[in-house]
Image (cartoon, rainbow, N blue to C red):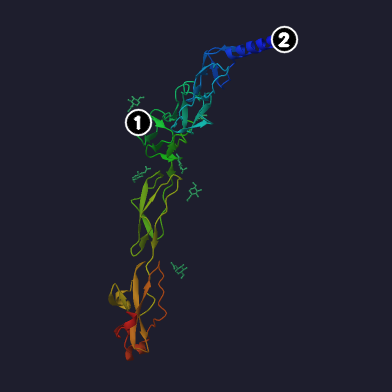
Amino acid sequence: MFPLVLVAFALSHCALAARVCPRPPEVLFATINVDKKVYDVGEEIEYTCRPGFIPNNGQRKYTCLPTGRWPLNTLLCLPQRCPRPGPLQNGKIEAIDSHYQSSISFSCEPGYNLVGTRTSQCMADGKWSGTFPQCQSVTCAPPSIPEFGVLSYRRLKPGNVSHFLDTIVFECVPPLALIGNETATCMANGNWSSIPECRVVTCPTPTGIENGFIEFAVRRTYHYNESVSFGCQPSYVLDGHKHSRCEKTGNWSTKPICRGPCKIPVKKAVVLYNGEKKRVQNDLKEGIRHGETVSFFCKNKEKSCAYTVAAQCVDGNLTLPACFKERGFFSTLVKKDPSDMKPCEDQA
Ligand SMILES: *[C@@H]1O[C@H](CO)[C@@H](O)[C@H](O)[C@H]1NC(C)=O
Ligand SMILES: *[C@@H]1O[C@H](CO)[C@@H](O)[C@H](O)[C@H]1NC(C)=O
Ligand SMILES: *[C@@H]1O[C@H](CO)[C@@H](O)[C@H](O)[C@H]1NC(C)=O
Ligand SMILES: *[C@@H]1O[C@H](CO)[C@@H](O)[C@H](O)[C@H]1NC(C)=O
Ligand SMILES: *[C@@H]1O[C@H](CO)[C@@H](O)[C@H](O)[C@H]1NC(C)=O
Ligand SMILES: *[C@@H]1O[C@H](CO)[C@@H](O)[C@H](O)[C@H]1NC(C)=O
């Protein structure tokens, strides 16, 4: 009796064990269509990945085997990926990764405003939430200029709207002077970098220059940008700009200088002037003008030849070459003048 009972128990246990499967293994990020403690042999279950997760190519359906076991589970649910976002023109996107539920944030470079959402999430369907934003250039309103204003401006780029970094150029109605920066740039904050002013500027009656005069001068004050011109007395040479202009500072721009002529500091000599031999005592009594040169003849005693050395008139000063010897009355009678000697070969 006892052993029979034992066998019967063992049999019944065996039959029971063969007829059910336990709860199937859990798959991360997946649900099972039928959730029970035990499953009959031949019963089929199906895993579904949770939203935002996608199955690998493992099997999703499993059948409870007569052994009371489930076949080896090969399913994996992997997080959904969104495509690489961007690029965002004139801005940047900060992202750690692009998996389901990751978020990214958008920002724009200085001078650009973000239009649209600042952040976006990777959604279960593999798309980024919201619409992709844009970085729009800051615009600057036209600078305010009073009606009938003395200040006006020019846009350097065509169009009615000034964007970040566009520049404009201001102008004053003559004779007003523009004080400040004539160009302004549209800044990131939407303001112009600076707006100049137009002011009345006068310069005092111009004063004359030494050894010269003002041409057609009228004794009055002058406005900004008016100019006067200068001349020099005869035999003086004008050095610099002939015109002087009334500047924004109320000063006259640098005036020219009249440079004086030079007397040739010898009583008698033959020199080269403009390529021709001239007698100082006859032809160059008035001297030469500033900037001109004369060449003096010097003697090479050893080779009994002559060479020339040039001297320039610099504002009334002319320095004789050291080699030049002015001849006394006696020497002119007995010796040849260097200007009549044969030229030295190597001094040409
Ligand atoms: C510029 O703006 C003015 C007024 O705002 C408008 O009358 C004009 O047609 C615009 N010009 C252009 C080229 O858009
Ligand atoms: C004038 O302003 C521009 C910007 O608009 C700047 O680049 C330039 O250096 C300024 N000039 C002077 C003389 O300040
Ligand atoms: C722009 O200029 C206006 C007027 O000059 C000033 O009131 C405002 O504060 C400026 N804006 C910024 C952002 O600097
Ligand atoms: C100054 O005058 C000259 C002519 O003499 C003119 O060409 C120039 O445009 C003027 N400048 C200004 C800033 O008015
Ligand atoms: C221009 O005039 C001012 C006074 O109006 C003076 O202080 C300044 O030194 C002058 N500048 C030059 C370059 O002459
Ligand atoms: C001309 O000579 C004088 C003195 O003789 C001197 O003071 C002056 O600086 C000289 N000028 C030139 C331009 O060399």
Amino acid type of the residue that numbered disc 2 sits on in the rendered structure:
Phe
Between 160 and 306, the one lying in front of the other is 160
Residue farthest to the front, as pictured: 1
Label 1 environment density (alpha carbons within 10 Å; few <14, some 14–19, many ≥20): few
| Residue 319 coordinates in the image, percent (x, y) | 41, 74
Residue farthest to the bottom, as pictured: 334
Q: Which is more N-terminal, label 1 or label 2?
A: 2
Measured in 3D between alpha carbons, the distance from the residue under mark 2 to the one under mark 1, in whole angstroms, is: 107 Å
Which label was assigned to residue 119?
none
Quadrant (top left/top right/bottom left/bottom right) for the C terminus: bottom left
Secondary structure beneath dot 1 equals loop
The image shows residue 143, relative to residue 178, as above or below, that is: above
Q: Which residue is mark 1?
A: 159
Residue farthest to the left, as pictured: 276
Residue farthest to the right, as pictured: 2
Q: Which residue is mark 2?
A: 2
| Residue 216 coordinates in the image, percent (x, y) | 33, 51
Is any atom of residue 200 visible in this view?
no
Amino acid type of the residue that numbered disc 1 sits on in the rendered structure:
Gly
The image shows residue 75, relative to residue 180, as above or below, that is: above
Q: What residue is shown at x 37% (from left), y 67% (from top)?
A: 261
Label 1 residue near ligand 1, CB within 8 Å = yes
The image shows residue 195, relative to residue 323, as above or below, that is: above
Is any atom of residue 171 visible in this view?
yes
| Residue 285 coordinates in the image, percent (x, y) | 33, 74
The answer to which image quadrant residue 13 occupies is: top right
